[in-house]
Image (cartoon, rainbow, N blue to C red):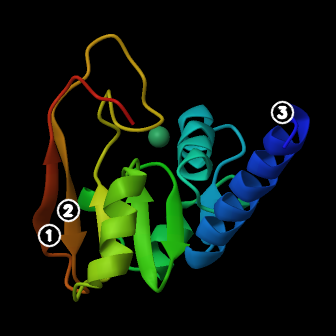
Amino acid sequence: MKPLVLWTTWVLLAAAAIAAHAASLPEVLVYKSPTCGCCGSWVDHMKASGFRVKVVEQNDVMPIKQRFGVPDHLASCHTALVGGYVVEGHVPASAVKRLLKERPTAVGVTVPGMPIGSPGMDGPNPEPFSTQLFDERGRARVYESYRPPYRW
Ligand SMILES: [Cu+2]
């Protein structure tokens, strides 16, 4: 085959592989304030990790957290729904994929607050943090722990 034909074939195969991968992951529905920059960066992180993301913007996201059972002490900036789970804050896409694969009994997963270094929260001094599973009574347990340096 000529190089151009080979290259074209490779591009088509790669595009098909990416499309198949995206189709196997459920869509992420994100509720965020229109002025939240780090929320937008997390959306970019999820897209770069193969998720299709739909964004709903509203100025006050607190009612969303109440509606989906995110307790105040576990809350962050944006709130997302994916595959029947609530995903609160800057949760790494890898943890969301693991959640969807293992399907633990939980309302969802959260990274409370906005730790520097978590996906979408770039900063000079990344800090250790963890994702936590939480139940309908607001009880949380550590799901994954992370230490810098980060490479999301
Ligand atoms: Cu944020």
Rendered residue at 42%/54% (across/down) = 93
Reading the image, the residue beneath label 2 is 132
Three-letter amino acid code of the residue under disc 1 = Ala
Dot 1 alpha-carbon crowd within 10 angstroms: few under 14, some 14 to 19, many 20 or more:
some
Reading the image, the residue beneath label 3 is 3
Rendered residue at 13%/48% (across/down) = 145
Residues tagged 1 and 2 counted as in contact (Cβ below 8 A): yes
Reading the image, the residue beneath label 1 is 140
Helix, strand or loop for disc 1: strand
Dot 3 alpha-carbon crowd within 10 angstroms: few under 14, some 14 to 19, many 20 or more:
few
Q: Nearer the viewer, residue 63 or 43?
A: 43
Q: Nearer the viewer, residue 97 or 60?
A: 97
Q: Which residue is the extreme one toward the top?
A: 124
Q: CA distance from mark 2 to mark 3?
A: 50 Å
Q: Is residue 53 visible?
A: no
Of the 4 image quadrants, the one containing the N terminus is top right
Dot 1 or dot 2: first in sequence order is 2
Which mark's residue is nearer the viewer, 1 or 2?
Answer: 2
Which mark's residue is nearer the viewer, 3 or 1?
Answer: 3
Q: Is residue 55 visible?
A: yes
Residue 123, percent across and down?
38, 17
Three-letter amino acid code of the residue under disc 3 = Pro
Asked if 93 appears above or below 126 in the picture, the reply is below
Residue 48, percent across and down?
59, 45
* Mark 1 close to ligand 1, CB under 8 Å: no
Rendered residue at 89%/35% (across/down) = 4
Residue 106, percent across and down?
25, 83
Asked if 152 appears above or below 108 in the picture, the reply is above
Three-letter amino acid code of the residue under disc 2 = Gln
